[in-house]
């Protein structure tokens, strides 16, 4: 596995220079892509797409691991799934979405996306609104 804070070269040209991408960027792309799939509640640690995009990749280490093997990326994700969704169907959709997103955004090849389900999240019942009593007039 590549060390964190390492770079992947996505473009190298003697005339124009080199373009590199950090591991944390790859983690963020994979995480956001996974959470966009219907049936995925969050990443391990209850990280949602909104939290990931606001907080960057600081909290992704328990949920996303990306290895580089023979110039191909191998992605490992740990997800929480919503109750009532098919684990195999959601997992396949996550694999396709993450692979497509990483390859389209970076040009790097993805050879595998491994998905682990950490927990099933139940939908919360809507909270009842309480009526406020009007203030008494004096």
Image (spheres, rainbow, N blue to C red):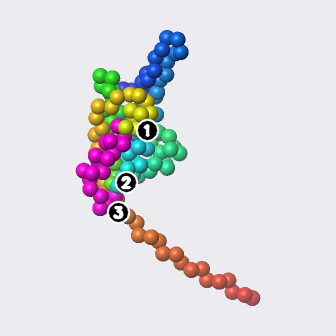
Specify which label sits upstream in the sequence, 2 or 3: 2
Residue 42 among those drawn in magenta: no
Residue 106, by quadrant, is top left
Q: Residue furthest bottom?
A: 138
Picture disc at residue 29: 1
Q: Residue furthest top?
A: 14
Report which residue position mark 2 lands on.
38
Where are the magenta residues, as a range?
A: 82-99
Q: Residue furthest left?
A: 88
Residue at figure coordinates x 28%, y 46% from the top left: 92
Q: Residue furthest right?
A: 138
Specify which label sits upstream in the sequence, 3 or 1: 1
Residue 98 among those drawn in magenta: yes
Q: Quadrant of the N terminus?
A: top left
Contact? badges 2 and 1 (CB < 8 Å): no
Residue at figure coordinates x 27%, y 51% from the top left: 89
Between the C-alphas of marks 3 and 1, the distance is 26 Å
Specify which label sits upstream in the sequence, 2 or 1: 1
């Amino acid at each position: 596995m590549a060390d964190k804070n390492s770079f992947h070269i996505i473009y190298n040209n003697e005339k124009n220079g080199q373009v590199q991408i950090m591991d944390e960027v790859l983690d963020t792309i994979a995480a956001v892509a996974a959470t966009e799939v219907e049936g995925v509640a969050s990443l391990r640690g209850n990280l949602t797409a909104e939290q990931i995009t606001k907080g960057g990749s600081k909290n992704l280490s328990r949920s996303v691991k990306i290895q580089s093997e023979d110039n191909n990326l191998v992605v490992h994700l740990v997800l929480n799934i919503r109750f009532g969704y098919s684990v195999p169907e959601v997992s396949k959709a996550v694999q396709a979405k993450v692979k497509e997103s990483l390859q389209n955004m970076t040009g790097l090849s993805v050879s595998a996306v491994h998905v682990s389900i950490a927990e099933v999240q139940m939908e919360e019942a809507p909270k009842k609104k309480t009526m406020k009593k009007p203030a008494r007039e004096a």
